[in-house]
Image (cartoon, rainbow, N blue to C red):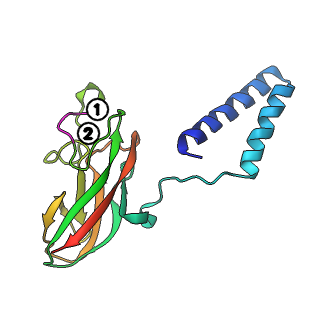
Amino acid sequence: MDLSKISILLLCTSIVFMNCFSDRRVSNHYNAEMKVLISLIENPVPFSVTPSSSTIPENRVYANLEWQDSGYELKENLKFQLSATGSWYMTASTPIPPEGTSTNPALFSIDYRLNKNFLHGQLLCRNSNSRSEIFSLGWTTPAVSGRLECQINDTHLTNNSGFLKIILNYE
């Protein structure tokens, strides 16, 4: 069951409860709905949710989370190439690639970029031991060892969805 189905389930539950309490009666129709809802609660269908940043599988970076540990170790003075596959979404239903977009997807043209030197929705990364240096796709040589942390270039994360799978290759 995906998150949209869970949202619908919660909405239906709310409507059922509101109708039950507003009418002060529970009809057979509501009883049937409640039985379905209770069976889903008692026998939940497995579904995937956005994991916490400490448990990101397959080196994924989620669009709705702040700086996330990618699962990669960076080695001091060892050049690496960062690439990514997939796309994620900001406000609209248009997929945004890892490279970002020059078109602002935000309503009313509000600029929600975390870093104005990069495109809207672009994959941003940093070294956990040198957080002021932001970089993106391509070749980079870290000055110090640390963990690779990544985030979408956006400050309004709650309306984002999707993820990128990142790949790190050493020279």
**Does 32 appear in magenta?**
no
Q: Residue at x 80, y 29 (%)?
A: 30
- Quarter of the C terminus within the rendering: bottom left
Q: Residue at x 76, y 51 (%)?
A: 42
Residue 2 position, x and y percent, is 55, 45
**Does 105 appear in magenta?**
yes
Q: Earlier in the sequence, mark 2 or mark 1?
A: 1
Q: Residue at x 28, y 64 (%)?
A: 167
Q: Residue at x 86, y 27 (%)?
A: 28
- Amino acid at the residue labelled 1: Ala
Left or right: 40 with respect to 158?
A: right
Residue 12 position, x and y percent, is 67, 32
Residue 97 position, x and y percent, is 26, 46
Residue 108, above or below 62: above
**Label 2 neighbourhood size at 10 Å, few (<14), some (14-19), many (20+)?**
some
Task: State the residue position of label 1.
Answer: 106
Residue 170 position, x and y percent, is 19, 74
Residue 25, above or below 170: above
Circle 2 SS class? loop
- Amino acid at the residue labelled 2: Tyr
Q: From where the camera sits, is residue 23 visible?
A: yes
Task: State the residue position of label 2.
Answer: 112
Of residue 162 and residue 128, the one placed in the foreground of this image is 162
Marks 2 and 1, how far apart in space?
8 Å
Left or right: 139 with respect to 97?
A: left
**Label 1 neighbourhood size at 10 Å, few (<14), some (14-19), many (20+)?**
some
Left or right: 143 with respect to 58?
A: left
Q: Main secondary structure of the magenta part?
A: loop
Circle 1 SS class? loop
The answer to whether mark 2 and mark 1 are in CB contact below 8 A is yes
Magenta residues (range): 101-106
